[in-house]
Amino acid sequence: MNLVIMIPFINGLRMAMPMLGSLKYNTSDSPEWLIIDNGSTDPVEKYIMNYVKPKRMSYIRNDINPGLIANNNFAYNYCKDNGIDLLCLLHNDCFIYEKGWDQRIVSYFEKMPDLGIAGFFGAQGCHVDGGRMQDTNFPGRSGYSEMLEAELHGMRMGVNMPWRPAAIFDSFCMVFRVEMLKKCNGFDTRYKWHHFYDRDSSLQSLRQGYKNIIVNVPNHHIGGLTNENPFYQEWLLKQIGSKMEDGVVHNENKEKFMKKWEFALPLYVNDDFTFRTGPTGLGMDYKGDSILKVVSKVEPLKK
């Protein structure tokens, strides 16, 4: 199976340099790198071509930033049009510490024809508001990963757990089966710019009858660099009148997410990939396999 790794940029090259080096030395020569530059003034293409030198690379330049979801859909269409099997969406602040990580993940898709998404950080449960839910004796730990600081965000997977079933993922590294995305018509463009596409696409995979897994790949995600980027802040100022988002876009997308998926949430994927029924312990009941059913009463979202 062939794989494309899409990495978006909106400046921030200096902080991304060590990430690109980590990716170069820990990734096999097989995947194609798809770099999408969203109007950067940093010399992104020149640096990658002259110093990182991936074996195979395509570079796309946007004069303005169309948003991350638009980047994702461009990458999806690129894969669909070029016969690519798998699409990895990778943030430029995610460090990967396993040699040949891509080959191991590809092998899971080859062995599991019903695998829709593999991700670095996720949870087996999804709350009605998109929040992670995970069975645990440790309050506040709501997911699995092998991040350096895994215990700060959830629980560490450990060497004896190469992967675990998942309901939803966080977006910094997700690998999609392109055939699954075709059935979903790509990423839902009714969400604005960047929030909740990770949760939405995770549930879309389950709704199409695919499985999701969290993979045990050592990694580190810095996070928040785009929000602190002056170039991005100037762009945001033009969009919403403020350099800081302050939850405006996030909350707007959350409302759309909750409306779209209220028929299926809360949801929990058991260790055997079945869907849980019964009380959540939070005053709600899990809705079992409702996500697999077409519910005509669900109103379409308005753009």
Image (cartoon, rainbow, N blue to C red):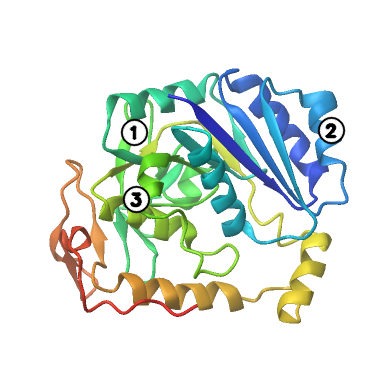
Return the disc, 3 or 1, that comes first in the chain's sequence: 1
**Whole-Å distance between the Cαs marked 3 and 2?**
37 Å
Q: Earlier in the sequence, mark 3 or mark 2?
A: 2
Residue 47 shown left or right of residue 273 in the figure:
right
For discs 3 and 1, the disc positioned in front in the rendered view: 3
| Left or right for 245, reference 82 | right
Marking on residue 16:
none
Q: Residue at x 60, y 40 (%)?
A: 6
Tell which tag, 1 or 2, sits nearer the viewer: 2
Badge 2 element: helix
Q: Which residue is mark 3?
A: 183
**Nearer to me, 71 or 154:** 71
Outermost residue toward the front in this view: 81
Q: Quadrant of residue 55?
A: top right
**Nearer to us in this view, 285 or 41:** 41
Using the image, determine if residue 87 lies above or below residue 252. above
CA distance separating discs 1 and 2: 35 Å
The residue wearing badge 2 is: 47
Residue at 71% in and 62% down: 227
Q: Amino acid at mark 3?
A: Lys
Tell me if residue 147 can be seen: no
